[in-house]
Image (cartoon, helix red, strand yellow):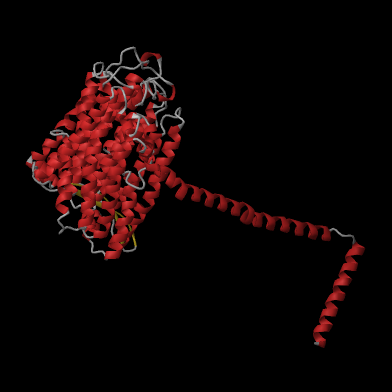
Amino acid sequence: MTATGVFGALLPGVPLLLGLLGLLLPPGDGGPRRAAAALGIAGAAFALADAIALLAVVTSRSEPLAASTHWVSFGDIEMVLGFSAGAAALYVALAVCTVALCVQVYSVTYLHDDSRYAPYAAQVSLFTGAMLLVVTSGDLIGLLIGWEVMGACSYLLIGHDRRLPEAPAAAMKAFLVTRVGDVGFLLGIALLIADSGTSRLSAVLAHDYSSATLTAALLLLLAGVAGKSAQFPLHTWLPDAMAGPTPISALIHAATMVAAGVYVVFRTFPLFQRSPAALAVLAVMASITILLGALSATAQDDLKRVLAWSTVSQIGYMTGALAVGSPAAALFHLLTHAAFKALLFLAAGAVIHAVGTNYLSRMGGLREHMPVTFWSFVIGLGALAGLPPLAGFWSKENVLTAAAHATDGGTAVPAWAAWVVWVAALLAVGVTAWYSTRLLLRAFFGPSRSYGPDGPDWEVGFDDARYRTPAVPHDPPALMRWPIVLLAIPAALLGLAAFAPGFRHALELDDPHLGVAILLPLLLLAAGAGTAWWLWWAVPGVDPVLALGRARPLFAAGFHLDRVQSVLVVRPVRALARLVTTVDERVVDAAVEGTGTVTRGLGGVLARAHRIALPGAAVLVLFGALVLGIVAWLGAVA
């Protein structure tokens, strides 16, 4: 294997290896904690340096890096393991490593008194390595392994704080909902491998499938994408995943798990281009998700749930860009979203650290006391809303432009599907600006409130006397503050990379432009933000969410889709499980146990027959002989 192949294998391999070593450390403070922090930070830092080096090599060569080796054959089907990454893949790897490193450093202070920090840091490393495996795998087997490891790690990390009663339930929900999609994902991969005769990704993409086989395989893949990337109808796990520690929310929402589904569609997009039906399904799924996530975010009181629903909506923008035939726009928005969403979640952790609650209704007046956190939120929320010239503006502009162009027809996606994506994305611009402005006003403006640890709202890591909330909130400690400051830079400036020829060429982006088509989104952004601001100042101290009226409970409950899933899926499955259990216990087990009982009884009868006295035995023998004789005589007569 060449040197680039070795370094390519080390990109996911080192975090995975150090994560496994970290799992061997005993829980507790002192030495194990320091060793866990060193392993976690070292793994992310090495992966970041490796990604930068590989990106430099790819840029100089102007061609992807690839290396593979034969693994095993099943008849005519060849299974391989390999590494394959072009510049676009390495940009994603760079984003993953940057966010993972910031999360590892941030968590040292955030979980300063957590006795289970060692397994936490190890699981973060495993999670990071698994995502890097998805990004750089040159075959479907390696991709599937990374995909499944992420699912297991998400379960462990979301349920990390066992003191919170909702954490285990949220972890189980995330695991089961994504597992539903993963069944389809596994079947889709199996169908592609079986038809192409290999797991090598380049060969799978080049194979000539029949229309029916290809569409079926891609729809199955989309089931897994909907689960991992929290797209309708398998999105319901993501808001509940806020029960996990805030750094994990940043990792899951920004650059790893929810981005994995988008990236898989990006990697397999040549197949989707050959299936208009799959693209139409993806377009409808994306459009519903964009509006569902944005509207649900408007009515949340929990700071982290606002950001969670915004993630659902923003991932919808990415899948919408893929649906209208612009994987470059999708990947660009994935990169900018990784920056500003990681920034927002880590800044949210700083706010929670300062005030001791997740609820916006218990915040206010933090602007003067937490200037670094405030300006970080300004940058992050501005990028989320698409405020120029911040990063989110340029990536959203590419998505909207791609959707508008696709409405003219002439592309793989049907024109009606492109119209649906474009309208949904436009409407969500105004809604996103509204809830972003509301969040900023509720948390940082208005009257100050009394702060302090308040029961179940107090998150893991800040429940000892050293970190009790003081009378005046303050910006976070240095190890929490510097990752926030560093992430603010790409959140503000990454969009300008669209003007760099090398970056545009790597992602195959169109040249950035500010034409008439961008005026409508800017007007909607101004209308959304201006409405929230006007409502805030028109009735001082009153939450603008009250303007939603009767729609507020509907939006706050995420359109009650959890209840719908419970009625249509959870309850029938539980009823079927109870029926199967009853049949197993009262029919199958009863038959087996009854057979044993009858056999034991018959054996007992025979045992007693063998112990009968000699006169009785003689009588029985004579009686048997008489019966046999009668039977023989009757047979002879007949």
- In the rendered view, tell whether residue 507 sits above or below residue 602: above
Q: In which quarter of the image is residue 340?
A: top left
The location of residue 568, given as percent across then percent down, is 45, 50
The one nearer the camera, 386 or 29, is 386
For image coordinates 28% across by 43% down, the residue present is 291
Using the rendered view, name the quadrant where residue 355 is placed.
Answer: top left
Where residue 368 appears, as percent x and y from the top left, is: 24, 16
Q: Which residue is drawn at 14% across and 36% down?
A: 495
The one of 619 and 178 positioned closer to us in this rendering:
178
Residue 354 pos. (x, y %): 32, 19
Q: Residue, x 23% and y 49% (percent of image)?
A: 421
Is residue 252 visible in the rendered image? The answer is no
Query: Could you tell whether 501 is left or right of 440 in the image?
Result: left
Q: Is residue 270 above or below residue 497?
A: below
Which residue occupies the foreground of this view, 415 or 269? Answer: 415
Residue 112, given in percent of the width and then of the height, sits at 35, 21
Residue 121: image quadrant is top left
Q: Residue at x 86, y 74 (%)?
A: 625
Q: What quarter of the picture does the C terminus occupy?
A: bottom right
